[in-house]
Amino acid sequence: MAKVMEGLYYSESHEYVRIEDNMGFIGITDYAQHALGNVVYVDMPEADDEVTAGEEFGAVESVKAASDLIAPVSGVVVEVNEALEDQPELINQDPYANWIIKVELADKAELDNLMDAKAYAAFCEK
């Protein structure tokens, strides 16, 4: 069974966002990395790019498949996780510690459209 972390917000496309002040750390869930298998490449936006909730901001490629990354919230990219450029497999090791992008949130109310840990765990069991 995939690990679901309390205190995060989850999307139906299996991204999570961790909130610290007005910053959102976005990555893929444990469920998603299990489904993908060994991650070999992460396509990320650049700092200062804008992301929009519900729209693609990059992709994760594995030996089995490529999967678009869908932004759970809107905002401006403040930082990308450069470690993933050389070590994309970090996502397989711990997807919650290895976020993909950090964004300054445009609208915290968008979090109301996402699932909490309990709802996401139930969603994954379907």
Image (cartoon, rainbow, N blue to C red):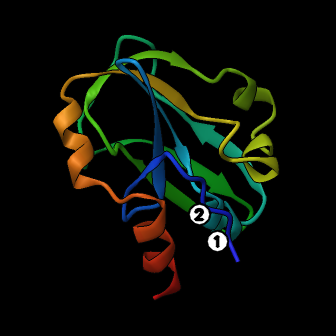
Question: Which quadrant of the rendered structure holds the C terminus?
Answer: bottom left
Q: Where 73 sits versus 46, above or below?
A: below
Furthest-bottom residue in this view: 126
**Which residue is at a point 47% across and 52% down the rendered structure image?**
15
Q: Amino acid at mark 2?
A: Ala
Report x, y in % for residue 33.
Answer: 66, 60
Q: Where 121 sits versus 50, above or below?
A: below
Which residue position holds label 2?
32
Q: Amino acid at mark 1?
A: Ala
**Which residue is at a point 69% across and 36% down the rendered structure image?**
98
Which residue position holds label 1?
35
Q: Nearer the viewer, residue 32 or 8?
A: 8
Q: Secondary structure at mark 1?
A: helix
Whether the residues at callouts 2 and 1 have beta carbons within 8 Å, the answer is yes
Report x, y in % for residue 118.
Answer: 46, 68
Q: Nearer the viewer, residue 104 or 68?
A: 104
